[in-house]
Image: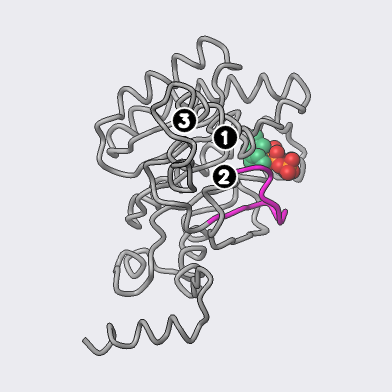
Amino acid sequence: MVNISEQSDASLITRPAHVAIVMDGNGRWAKKRLMPRAAGHKAGVGALQKIIETASTADIECLTVFAFSSENWNRPKMEVSILMDLFVSSLNKYLPELIKAGVCLRFIGDRSAFSEKLISSLTEAEKRTRGNTGLKFNIAMNYGGRWDITHATKQLLLDVQSGSVSQDDINEDVFSRYLSLADLPAVDLFIRTGGEHRISNFLLWQCAYSELYFSDTLWPDFDGEHFLSALQCFSGRQRRFGRTGDQLEADIQPQQKA
Ligand code: IPE
Ligand code: IPE
Ligand code: MG
């Protein structure tokens, strides 16, 4: 069992600055209980609320969750419609709490496909939390990593055409400024619940060097303790970024002596 107070002690674990979560398993959670899939999605919102609290307590700087992928339009119309309604109602329900907790909300993805009602809820939530200095909480809706890269490319091309960026100056750093979440650290820890071992077109660029953590727990059952276990696991990983383990240890030793 992982103790929250222990986890809050920065000396005990290496904390990821940015955690991304694919919240998967709502439908199976409901099916196991002979309930409609919608009940699973509703329970999923409750689970998310607890994870936001835990992430804030654990001093995580940024949390980005996958709520609706560009591919999820392929689901039955009724399920898509239920999800869209749930986004509006959940935002209305939880926004006051999020504001109180100092959370800064941002939505990433192509919102042009959404209803005016949903678009104005998203814009309003962003506006009302913009100045908050607590957890940076990002919700990916109608988001796809390929969409993000394509969209960034188009924006960059516009700047090349207008002359504000020279083609010769384009490099990874310049390109990444056109992507979603460009101002935030890259994703350190990528969590997927629900037992599937895939990225499903989530933050492809931003997760290039993430530590991956897969949990069999279905999203509505994923609680604070599960989240802290993922953090604990992350703190035991050696992030090499191309270097050898020996190189890393050689770098770390002088710091330990100091
Ligand atoms: C994730 O749960 C939520 C969304 C994709 C909106 P699923 O609905 O994919 O749940 P499973 O995978 O069918 O159990
Ligand atoms: C990924 O889950 C998207 C979200 C959690 C919003 P899916 O359940 O849609 O992913 P696939 O289709 O099984 O890969
Ligand atoms: Mg799924």
- Location of residue 79 with respect to 104 vertically, above or below: above
Residue 83, by quadrant, is top right
> Are the residues flagged by discs 1 and 2 in contact, CB closer than 8 Å?
yes
> Hey, what amino acid is under mark 3?
Phe
Q: Nearer the viewer, residue 166 or 201?
A: 166
- Specify which label sits upstream in the sequence, 3 or 1: 3
Residue plotted at (39% across, 87% down): 250
Does residue 180 appear to the left or right of 192 in the view shown? Answer: left
Does residue 71 appear to the left or right of 228 in the view shown? Answer: right
- Location of residue 20 with respect to 240 vertically, above or below: above
- Location of residue 12 with respect to 85 vertically, above or below: below
Mark 1 surroundings: few (<14), some (14-19) or many (≥20) residues within 10 A: many
- Specify which label sits upstream in the sequence, 1 or 2: 1
Residue 98 x %, y % = 35, 34
Residue plotted at (44% across, 42% down): 169
User: What residue sits right under mark 1 in the picture?
Assistant: 148
Residue sitting at the far left: 258
C-alpha span from label 3 to label 2: 13 Å
| Mark 1 within 8 Å of ligand 2, using the beta carbon | no
User: What residue sits right under mark 3 in the picture?
Assistant: 107
> Hey, what amino acid is under mark 1?
Asp
